[in-house]
Amino acid sequence: MTHFTQIQAVTFDVGGTLIRPWPSVGHVYAEVAARHGVESVPPEALNRQFRAAWRKLKTFNHGREEWSALVDQTFAGLSVEAPSRTFFPEIYDRFREPDAWQIFDDVLPTLHELAALGINLGIISNWDDRLVPLLKSLGLNKYFEAIIVSCDVGFSKPSPVIFEQAAKKLGVPPGSILHVGDSLDADVAGAKAAGFETVLVDRSLREDEPGRIKSLRRLEGMV
């Protein structure tokens, strides 16, 4: 197991790292659609189309209009009217609610342990203005000294600017920060470009690999 020396702070991505949509994006979309008369839309089909639309994105700044366009693409061929003309606002607001999300099982024990070791914790996330209230609703905000969100900074990962803002707010040099996320491009490449140490979390792994961990609990032996 890799051991990082001189780590004074650990920063985390949020979506896919600390929390995930519950039961899935497709289930939440289908639930809202059904309340608006768009029934029998399979969540699995919505998940497939959401993933396909997400992969096609070249840039995404998490603005409301961008989310609206992404939801429209997700429902293409599955609803008569585009959600942007009907129930998109309710979908958007649904993801403000804590019960639309699940905290991964390894998160709270890891945050407790790292805090007990005296390590400062932060968040670096590409998100919109729904994130901080959501973290409060989930009871997660209390663990973090700094919560850096792309909508506030004006730059999204992998831009080094958002990482530099986190280092400044945490008050420690970039080389003393370990960033943890689930995206090779946004998290790993972005963190490295900013001079951070970094590790990828991939819960689908059978066992750890170089630079990748299958559980956040592995962090306790790495810092």
Image (cartoon, rainbow, N blue to C red):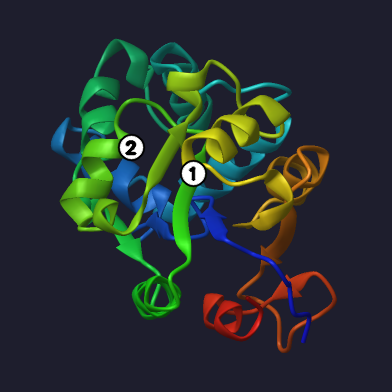
Instruction: Determine crowd level at label 2: few under 14, some 14-19, many 20+ residues with C-alpha closer than 10 A.
Output: some
Vertical position of residue 38 compared to residue 200: above or below: above
Pointers 2 and 1 in contact (C-beta within 8 Å):
no
Q: Regarding mark 2 in the picture, which secondary structure is present there? A: helix
Q: Regarding mark 1 in the picture, which secondary structure is present there? A: helix
Disc 2: which residue = 131
Q: Nearer the viewer, residue 87 or 195?
A: 195
Residue drawn at point x = 73 percent, y = 58 percent = 198
Disc 1: which residue = 170
Residue drawn at point x = 77 percent, y = 87 percent = 1
Where's residue 147, x and y in %? 40, 40
Q: Earlier in the sequence, mark 2 or mark 1?
A: 2
Left or right, 126 with respect to 3, comes to: left
Vertical position of residue 213 compared to residue 173: above or below: below
Residue drawn at point x = 78 percent, y = 44 percent = 195
Instruction: Determine crowd level at label 1: few under 14, some 14-19, many 20+ residues with C-alpha closer than 10 A.
Output: many
Q: Is residue 135 visible?
A: yes
- Under mark 1, the amino acid is Leu
